């Protein structure tokens, strides 16, 4: 198989994570999601707990969505006061993403991987979305919440994903122009989403990409 990196951004309840995992299994490659936090912890020597805490702090910061710290590469060194800042924790995650993309074909879920890898010619970016009622129904299947609670949870989760993406990229998370391919999982189903991603890859990178 030729070199191929697929990044997947997704609305909560659209099944984007599952589709990414199915794609990776179909291609026989690794799928990376929150494993990136552990790997960034191992690389930096910073406790993994701090990476998780940084996500929560950003999630609960009411001003988060109004600011940006667009990722430009680089790392803050251990002797600097900002070594364990949220921005530097993201820098280490980006470093891991870049290193993995350099050595193997793989699938990345979230973490602004499409932006981090935007200069690589072997990357295709995908956004998985679905109507609200579809996402709500899938969320209700997997969580013990009332419908109203699930609606609020989905809205909060997608807002955080949008804010996180905007903070580190300066871009709008659900803007189709940021991605190579946008798929409505409610219309295609998961298996056909996988096939659509592979079909696009063949058109873009050549019929022999999977040989």
Image: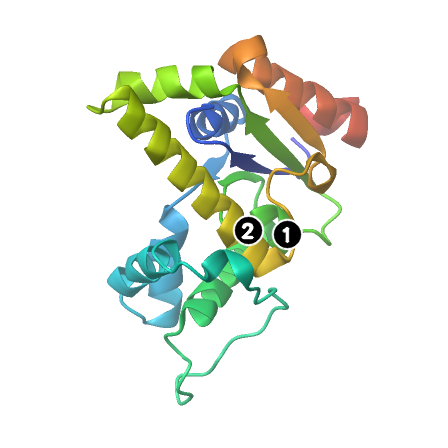
Q: Residue furthest bottom?
A: 79
Residue 98 appearing in the image: no
Residue 87 percent across, percent down from the top left: 47, 69
The answer to which of marks 1 and 2 sits earlier in the sequence is 1
Q: Residues within 10 Å of mark 1 (few under 14, many from 20)?
A: many
What label does residue 165 carry, if any?
2
Residue 64 appearing in the image: yes
Residue at 72% of width from left, 34% of height from top?
180
Front residue of 101/193: it is 193
Front residue of 8/21: it is 8
Helix, strand or loop under label 2: helix
Q: Where 111 falls versus 150 (above or below)?
A: below
Residue at 57% of width from left, 67% of height from top?
69
What label does residue 97 carry, if any?
none
Q: Where 57 falls versus 121 (above or below)?
A: below
Residue at 45% of width from left, 15% of height from top?
134
Residue at 40% of width from left, 61% of height from top?
40
Marks 1, 2: nearer the viewer = 2
Quadrant containing the C terminus in the rendered view: top right
Q: Are marks 1 and 2 in contact (CB under 8 Å)?
A: yes
Front residue of 136/117: it is 136
Quadrant containing the N terminus in the rendered view: top right
Residue 4 percent across, percent down from the top left: 65, 37
The residue to which callout 1 is attached is 115
118 sits to left or right of 50: right
Q: Residue furthest left?
A: 144
47 sits to left or right of 92: left
């Amino acid at each position: 198989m030729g070199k191929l990196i697929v990044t997947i951004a997704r609305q909560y309840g659209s099944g984007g994570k599952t589709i990414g995992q199915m794609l990776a299994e179909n291609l026989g490659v690794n799928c990376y999601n929150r494993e990136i936090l552990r790997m960034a912890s191992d690389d930096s020597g910073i406790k993994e707990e701090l990476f998780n805490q940084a996500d929560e702090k950003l999630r609960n910061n009411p001003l988060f969505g109004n600011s940006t710290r667009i990722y430009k590469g680089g790392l803050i060194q251990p002797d600097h006061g900002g070594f364990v800042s949220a921005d530097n924790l993201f820098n280490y995650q980006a470093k891991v993403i870049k290193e993995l993309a350099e050595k193997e074909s793989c699938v990345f879920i979230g973490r602004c991987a499409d932006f981090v890898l935007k200069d690589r010619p072997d990357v295709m970016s995908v956004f998985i979305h679905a109507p609200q009622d579809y996402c709500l129904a899938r969320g209700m299947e997997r969580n013990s919440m009332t419908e109203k609670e699930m609606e609020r949870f989905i809205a909060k989760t997608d807002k955080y994903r949008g804010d996180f993406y905007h903070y580190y990229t300066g871009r709008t998370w659900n803007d189709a122009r940021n991605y190579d391919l946008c798929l409505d999982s409610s219309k295609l189903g998961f298996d056909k989403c996988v096939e659509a991603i592979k079909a696009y890859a063949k058109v873009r990178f050549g019929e022999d990409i999977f040989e």
